[in-house]
Image (cartoon, grey):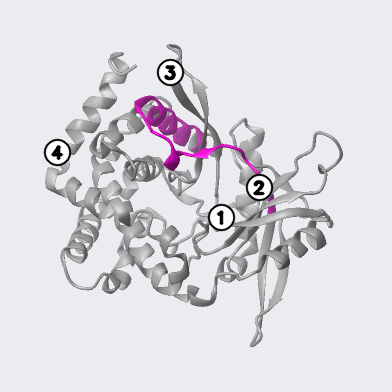
Amino acid sequence: MSRGDAQPARALAKPAFSDPQASALVESVFGLKVSQIRPLPSYDDQNFHVRVAGAEGGPGGPCEYVLKISNAEASRTPELLQVQTHALLFLRAAGLPTASVCRSKGGGLTSLVSADGGSRVTSYVVRLLTYLPGIPVAEVPVGPLLLYEIGRLAANLDETLEKFHHPKLSCLHRENFIWNLRNVPLLEKHVDILGQGQNRELVVRVIQLFKDEVLTKLKHFRECLNHGDLNDHNILVESSKSACGDAAYQVSGILDFDDMSYGYYVFEAAITIMYMMIESKSPMHVGGHVLAGFESVIPLTPVERGALFLLVCSRFCQSLVMAAYSCQLHPENEEYLMITAKTGWKHLQQLFDLGQRAVEEIWFETARSYTSGLSM
């Protein structure tokens, strides 16, 4: 999900390339002959699954790709997309399961193309990534061991990015990026989309608590680069067999680095916990397993742990409010945009009904059980 930093200007930002136009892009920009193409779900970009006629570079080369056409707003800052693309390659070289990037005929990792919309010509950044096989976590039963591995993956990713360098790295300080958890107060200008009622009241309450209890502690959090969108559709898994012969899953791919920005380790942990709760049959217990995996790599400080509950609630609010806002802009994409809303409001309300102390007790006791061997 690539989301522009200036969110309200996105009404005309989403690309609208047809399948034949996207196919022509692959051939003209990357020099590959397309044999099959189909659209993939996307928040406000366009993604296409592409099969090419024959493998690139001869036998053994990839023949499946994802064509990514960034929205017009994001395309106005190509240096940001370039940094994110280089980070993708850096992580792959470090052994993480990310896609590779196909260079254009001119040798670039990103290319700028123009589309005539009738009243004006709009420019879009396009990239071609290798297709990663696997099943989205959203489509498989997720047990404690997989949650632990996903938490560990999130921490490994952030830890690896500590070593990433790029001349334009500073552009990842995205001050007005509404999807960065530090910017939860920016939701205030969008809460009217919720109308009047319990959901709005809950969001307003979370925003105020965030201002009072999280913003004042940011200086005590450890800063890092965040993936920022480790949701259950951006993590792929493949089936395997456990030691006892039962069906199991292991992580096989990480998708979508378009929300990458500077944040904090605890942000990544909170974002991962929130998204793993969406489809869970035991959502209140998810946090402990994810936290145990995360802390096996990067233990959180007491201050960071103390903010985790409100950060998870805040991410629910970001996702729920901005989905409602984006659905108003793009009603044709409602099914994809409202995935979180199917269970998200219920989970957020349950978190508040239980209260921070009770939820922390569940999470921290579960995480502690891993160090004593009870959950493994």
| Mark in the foreground, 4 or 3 | 3
Disc 4 to disc 1: CB gap under 8 Å: no
Element on which disc 3 rests: loop
Alpha carbon separation for disc pair 4 and 2: 41 Å
Q: In the image, is residue 169 above or below residue 325? A: above
Residues marked 4 and 2 touching at CB (< 8 Å):
no
Q: Give the magenta part as a residue range.
A: 128-157
Q: Name the residue under label 2.
A: 86
- Residues 130 and 176: in front is 130
Q: Can residue 165 be seen in this view?
A: no
Q: Secondary structure under badge 4?
A: helix
- The tag earlier along the polypeptide, 4 or 3, is 3
- Give the percent coordinates (x, y) of residue 18: 66, 68
- Of badges 1 and 3, the one in the foreground is 3
Query: Residue 170 location in percent, x, y?
Result: 56, 55
The label shown at residue 246 is 3
What is the three-letter code of the residue carrying label 3?
Answer: Asp
Task: Tell me which residue sits at (31%, 13%) in the image.
Answer: 373
Amino acid type of disc 2? His
- Extreme right residue here? 58
